[in-house]
Image (spheres, grey):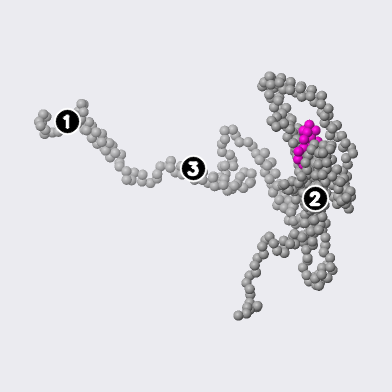
Amino acid sequence: MAPNDDAPKGKPKRRKRGGGRNWERKKLGGPKGPPPTPQLKVTIRNIHNADLNGTVQHVGDRILRKLVQLAGDKLNTPDRIVLQWDEAGFRALAEADEAARKLREEWKSKQESDGKNIDTKETSKEGEVADTIETTHSNDESSDLPSAVVEGMEHLTIDNPPQDEPTIHVRALYVLPPKKTKRRGEKTGCAYLVLTAPPIAARELDPDAASTRSGKSASDQAPAPIDYSQDVAKRRLMIQRTLEALIKTAEEDAKTKQEFSECVVLESLSGKTWKPRTDTIRRDRMEGTIEETADYKAFFEKSEQEKEERKARPKPAPGGGVSSVMTSASSSINNGGQPIAAIVLHLRKKQEEEKKRKQGKSKPKEGNGNKGLPNQTDTKAGAKKVRGGKNKRNKKTSSNGTSKPSAGVKPGSG
């Protein structure tokens, strides 16, 4: 039996979220714009000499800037790739490290001053150690750190490259300078850089070329995705060549001059970097609109007014007591004209009910109170009978604890 083509074939199957036409369009860069530019995280290990490279600023001046400059000189001749050092980002890292170092020094000086007041012997030993350290630094030629760091910096210039040349943006993600420890001696430092390729420019598809390929007019067919694969591949190749230039520069310096303290450059195993913000992302039309509404402004004005009223409110009397706000339990508005919370009203209602219940227990019962109860004379008579009965029982018992013989029974018989 031949199948009927006119019969409905049921509901179409839903597409998977991970694939399909939309995924291909997003991969190649569809109508939403070009894909994000490639990035690469670079690790610089084995930074020695804590005396010269003890801070983030010294590491940047003596190693990072020079390394980027020499690698850029190698790339600029054959490949025409320019490396641009992010000076603003590195300055922020250096300032944060300097502020943290000052805080540590202040804390140490405070601890030392507290220790001087407690024990005078320990302070004398610390003074002797400080004198020996000063004498060793005075005899050392490398103690002049500023001159050693600034030496050769006047010839180092990193200018903004022209716009027509491909530029790799180099930014210091974070820097850990080397330091000296009491147990392990000198611990090597490391630095992490991020290489960012130039952004991919958005392109528009030529409608005439699309119509000639498909044989249909541009209005009849859907917009075809734009292929940005070549642009992405070019930028990845630029980043790979930059990494090779950095590695080669560090290896050559380790064999000859050792200006970079025998550091090693390699690609980071963890490539976590920040996501670059592209200008093609459209801002949400509802973003930032709540701050401009009248209700939002009135809410903040009301909150400020409540703060002022709270400050001007008189302080409660010492020892506590019932405030004027608590007396108005039946009303849902306090003296200031503000509504009282529902939980407060509920608690006040419970307190009133408990108070009424206690008052009802303390009052005497109304109506025929003597109904069902014995009269006063009856109670007295009953009490006399009880007392009399107790006396009769007491008379029957003798003083030695033996009971008296009953009437009609002679003593000694039986």
Q: Quadrant of residue 224?
A: bottom right
* Residue 252 x, y percent position in the rendering: 83, 41
Residue wearing tag 2: 240
User: Residue at horizontal 79%, vertical 35%?
Assistant: 53
User: Is the residue 327 above or below the residue 222 in the image?
Assistant: above
Residue wearing tag 1: 404
User: Is the residue 40 above or below the residue 134 in the image?
Assistant: below
- Residue range in magenta is 44-59
Mark 2 or 1: the one toward you:
2
Mark on residue 236?
Answer: none
Q: Quadrant of residue 403?
A: top left
Res. 317 visible in picture? yes
Q: At numbered mark 1, what does the secondary structure look like: helix, strand or loop?
A: loop
Asked if the magenta segment contains residue 100, the reply would be no
Amino acid identity at mark 1? Lys
Residue wearing tag 3: 355
Amino acid identity at mark 3? Lys
